[in-house]
Amino acid sequence: MTGLILHAKGLTRLPRCCQPPRKCQSWVVHCSCYNFNVPRIQGTDVGLHASFRPSPLRRTWDPVRAATGSVEPELPGEPSRDLGPQQEASRKGPLPVKLLALIGLVLITGVSNRVLYRMALVPLRDHIFFLAQLQNLGYLAVYFTALWWRSRSSSGLVTPAMLRVNKWPLVGVGACEAVAQLLFMVGAAQLPGPLLPLVNQTYLVWSLVFASLILGARYSRAQLLGAALVLAGVCAAAVQPAALAQLLPPPLGAKAAGAAAAGAGAAVGAGAAAAATVELRYVAVCVACFAFPAIANCIKERVFRSFAAAHGRPLDIFVVNSWGSLFQAAFVLLLLPITTALKGIALADLPAHLATSLSVFTGAGTATPSYAVPLLALSYVAMNLVFNISILTLLRSLGSVTTTLVASSLVPLTIAAFTLPLPCLEPAVIGPNFVVGASLLMVGLITYNGGNWRALLAKEAKTQ
């Protein structure tokens, strides 16, 4: 899947039982396969702990405020339905130049992250295991380095009790994210680039479903309507007019097919031919794969809740991220026989397949220049890390509502980026069904987040 995740990318509010009264810690959950990380917000001061007494559990956990981002992964979005403006940074007047630059960095790295992901899949579409492990190794290095530094810090950011947290739930987290990562790479390699940021948003729907089933969360009618519009937008963008014409009665179907053919003939170029054939089975694979990170996030939520209830302080995010990424890398390795079977490769041919993957990574036997393949793959991994760090910094600086608003704007910007002439990719041709689908999706995101955004605007009006 492609990461924040926000491929998001998500923002979620923790229950009151896990929130210190004044100063608290920001939790971030990584979904490497979507290029999404899902920030779990308890406040704005990362690493600053305060003692507190848990209050009765409030079952209003919310999934993705804006699953705009990936996974894997992208940093993956998800907030609580009653998340109000109290978590926004209290400020007056225009944004400082540094914050404006940070917003620009989030937008640039978010779009680049998704574009580089699709470009890297062109030469490596038959070697997704290699790309997945390359991404996982990058996260392992960053997360365990941060965990080691925080555990040795004199301020007690990571305590021995945190390091002794039960690892078995994190094994399930790693398994879910590994399955999601591999399935998304299988499906994304066969889909046009502009469709990927739309498919990513189905993570919101899965999060609503599993948060309700596992955590007992409840949502407003506006949130449910927003999720339905997101799903309708993805369907409208993925299903071609010619395919719909086959479902209509013969007279109407013939007219609709003729109109679809005329519209396709108006678009000239190889990109139009590629855009005209979207295989729904690969769309279904990408949509289904987002169910696994939604389950993983529910497991992480329970880990955070149980630790806070037992120890009276929040669990450090890097403990969960580090061990979750380690188990994810292990399960990607264990799933290698299944991955190769999907490609029609026998188990006995695995060593030769890995040797071929390494050869392709170095640029041998590809139509692209020898330096392009490693450059694209490493650039994607590096850009994904920078995006995750920048979105977390923005979250700490401006709060969840502003962050999700910025993340939501990544969807149209990414679609526009894929229409440009890019290396390894043909310029995408945006058909009328795609415009309708993208419009429905944006309306769904606005509907889902509208309550929180209105509260933020009301607060800003009062402070002026």
Image: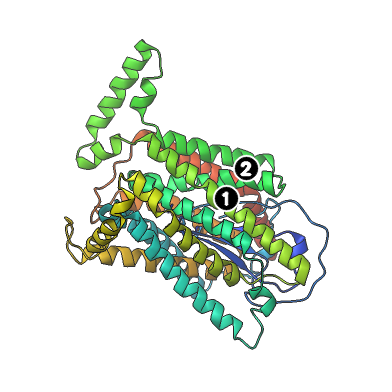
Question: In the image, is 333 to the left or to the right of 216?
Answer: left
Q: Residues within 10 Å of mark 1 (few under 14, many from 20)?
A: many
Q: Residues within 10 Å of mark 2 (few under 14, many from 20)?
A: some
Which residue is at a point 40% across and 32% down the rendered structure image?
Answer: 239
Choose between 430 and 310: the one closer to the eye. 310
Which residue is at a point 68% across and 44% down the rendered structure image?
Answer: 212
Which residue is at a point 63% across and 53% down the rendered structure image?
Answer: 298
Q: Which mark is residue 209?
A: 2
Q: Image quadrant of residue 154?
A: bottom right
Question: In the image, is 97 to the left or to the right of 57?
Answer: left
Q: Amino acid at mark 1?
A: Ala
Disc 2 from disc 1: Cα separation: 9 Å
Percent of width and height locating residue 106:
45, 65
Q: Which mark is residue 218?
A: none
Question: Which residue is disc 1 drawn over?
Answer: 294
Question: In the image, is 357 to the left or to the right of 215?
Answer: left
Asked if residue 224 is positioned above or below residue 371 in the image, the reply reads above
Callouts 2 and 1 close, C-beta under 8 Å = yes
